[in-house]
Image: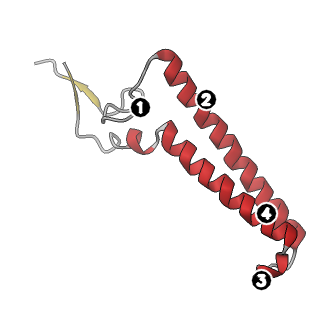
Amino acid sequence: NIRPSIHPLSSLSTMCSSHCCALYSLTGILFLLFVYTILSTQPFFVNGIKDVHAAKNNALGAMLLFVGLFLISLAGMFRRSMTGDSNDGIGGIGIGGIGVSSDND
């Protein structure tokens, strides 16, 4: 009989699901695409930037990091769907056994 334990890391699995990371990454991609577009087309609307070229490169680099995180999240969702594990960390079971205790009474 497996029951969720009261463990400080048991809610970590809910916060770190592939779906949550994918949504966060997609939001970051869209925001940084907007920033890159503004810096490319109308940089005078953004105050306080001394080097527009460096700011564009930084926005593009950060957007590519979000794209990488998004692809990793998609791979995690695909892997879970192929293995038949529909838990995806939701339900307090935990990641890799974290937060799981067995009832050996």
Of pointers 1 and 4, the one earlier in the residue sequence: 4
Q: Nearer the viewer, mark 1 or mark 3?
A: 3
Tag 2 residue: 75
Q: Marks 3 and 2, Cα distance to the nearest angstrom? A: 39 Å
Amino acid, disc 3: Gly
Of pointers 4 and 2, the one earlier in the residue sequence: 4
- In the picture, the disc for residue 95 is 1
Could you say which quadrant of the image residue 10 lies in? top left
Of pointers 1 and 3, the one earlier in the residue sequence: 3
38 with respect to 79 (left or right)? right
Amino acid, disc 2: Ala
Tag 4 residue: 36
The quadrant of the rendering that contains the N terminus is top left
Amino acid, disc 4: Tyr
Of pointers 4 and 3, the one earlier in the residue sequence: 4
Vertical side of 87 occupied by 24: above or below = below
Vertical side of 84 occupied by 24: above or below = below
Q: Marks 1 and 3, Cα distance to the nearest angstrom? A: 44 Å
Q: Name the residue located 57 percent from the left edge and 25 percent from the top edge.
A: 78
Tag 3 residue: 48
Image spot of residue 48 (x, y percent): 77, 83
Q: Marks 1 and 2, Cα distance to the nearest angstrom? A: 16 Å
Image spot of residue 77 (x, y percent): 54, 30
102 with respect to 86 (left or right)? left
Helix, strand or loop status at disc 2: helix
Amino acid, disc 1: Ile
5 with respect to 62 (left or right)? left
Helix, strand or loop status at disc 1: loop
Q: Name the residue located 60 percent from the left edge and 54 percent from the top edge.
A: 27
Q: Marks 1 and 4, Cα distance to the nearest angstrom? A: 36 Å
